[in-house]
Amino acid sequence: MAENKLKTFFQLAWQAPRLLRSLKIAATVGSMYNLINQGDVILAGDFANVNYIKLTLTYMTPFFVATYASVITEMKMREKDI
């Protein structure tokens, strides 16, 4: 049963409309957070001092949160239909 749910989770997560929506959210939220956290360095053009690990994680986090929330919501809605 759990294996089936995991398979369903990844099938839903890889749907193009969901991925596109998550990418848009990640671009918006990640950009805002990066400007908050490293904006002074980025806007000064001091790219040697940008923490690229933080920059990457700042985009990845909202992407995964948005995708997870969307998939879990759809899975719960499908359970109610059964």
Image (cartoon, helix red, strand yellow):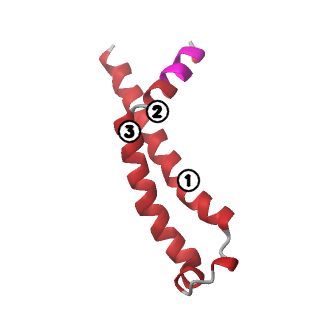
Q: Earlier in the sequence, mark 3 or mark 1?
A: 3
Q: Nearer the viewer, mark 3 or mark 1?
A: 3
Q: Main secondary structure of the magenta part?
A: helix
Residue 61: image location, x then y, percent: 55, 53
Tag 1: Cα neighbours inside 10 Å, few (<14), some, or many (≥20)?
A: some
Name the residue: 50% across, 75% down. Answer: 35
Tell me whether circle 2 and circle 3 mark residues in contact (CB < 8 Å).
yes
Give the labeled residue for mark 3: 18
> Toward the viewer: 19 or 69?
19
Residue 61 numbered tag: 1
Disc 3 residue type (three-letter):
Arg
Q: Secondary structure at mark 2?
A: helix
Tag 2: Cα neighbours inside 10 Å, few (<14), some, or many (≥20)?
A: some
Residue range highlighted in magenta: 3-8
Disc 1 residue type (three-letter):
Thr
Residue 67: image location, x then y, percent: 46, 41
Name the residue: 46% across, 55% down. Answer: 26
Is 33 situated above or below 24? below
Q: Toward which corner of the image does residue 58 lie, by quadrant?
A: bottom right
Q: Secondary structure at mark 3?
A: helix
Tag 3: Cα neighbours inside 10 Å, few (<14), some, or many (≥20)?
A: some
Residue lying at the far bottom of the rendered structure: 44
| Cα distance between the residues tagged 1 and 2 | 15 Å
Residue 13 numbered tag: 2
